[in-house]
Amino acid sequence: MAPSRGVASEIGRVAADALQRGPAEALRRFNLESMAGTPAAEVFETLADIICPAGGTIDEAIAREAMLAAAAELAASGVTFDALSAEALEAVFLGTIARSIEDKLFNELGSKAVRLPDDTAAVDRIERQLHDFVTGAVRDAFAGADGGIATLDIATVDATVAEIYERTFEVLQVLGDNA
């Protein structure tokens, strides 16, 4: 889960910098300040190439896909990075975390670390329950941050993501056993 936590921390840091110092300054440490007026989805796609380049480990690929999926949701809006609201930046941050956790758990299913029923309908139900649990847990964990995501430190993000992953893994085991 370390790569996913690292990506979440980086996205949180970009969002915090954008809110505190401005969009161009948030992108400056990546030498991308000229992209501040570019569509937000393109900015996050470029950041994905920098933060978690293609060709890495499975965990890095999970983190990359989670970030790209969160960015893809912005593509339809066409909003530029410099026009992103605090809520939109938070949505990308939370979406990246939630997708990373879910995708990592689905990878665990593939490695048979968790046993699920053979019934497709039961597996679909578990998947929906898991999604609801993860998105709710992520939202609840970070919504209470005083000052919003702009004030979160990397250690707090890392510890919170690890704890949510562990709780979700336990929930998945219970759901699989009880299906």
Image (cartoon, grey):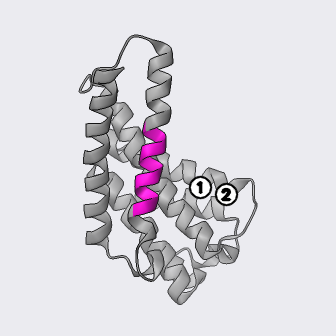
Whether residue 99 is situated above or below residue 35 in the rendered picture = above
Q: In what element is the residue under mark 1?
A: helix
* Alpha carbons under labels 2 and 1: distance apart: 5 Å
Tell me the magenta residue range: 130-140
Q: Which mark is residue 71?
A: 1
Q: Residue shown at 42%/57% (left/top)?
A: 138
For the residue pair 86 and 167, the one nearer the viewer reads as: 167
Q: Which mark is residue 5?
A: none
Residue that badge 2 annotates: 74
Q: Residue shown at 28%/30% (left/top)?
A: 174
Residue at the bottom extreme, as displayed: 21
| Three-letter code for the amino acid on which mark 1 is drawn | Ala
Whether residue 161 is situated above or below residue 23 in the rendered picture = above
Q: Residue 109 colored magenta? A: no
Q: Residue shown at 64%/60% (left/top)?
A: 42
The percent position of residue 83, horizontal first and vertical second, equals 70, 76
Q: For the residue carrying disc 2, how many other residues have a C-alpha within 10 Å: few (<14), some (14-19), or many (20+)?
A: many
For the residue pair 12 and 179, the one nearer the viewer reads as: 179
The quadrant where residue 140 appears: bottom left
Q: Main secondary structure of the magenta part?
A: helix
Left or right of 90? Residue 110 is: left
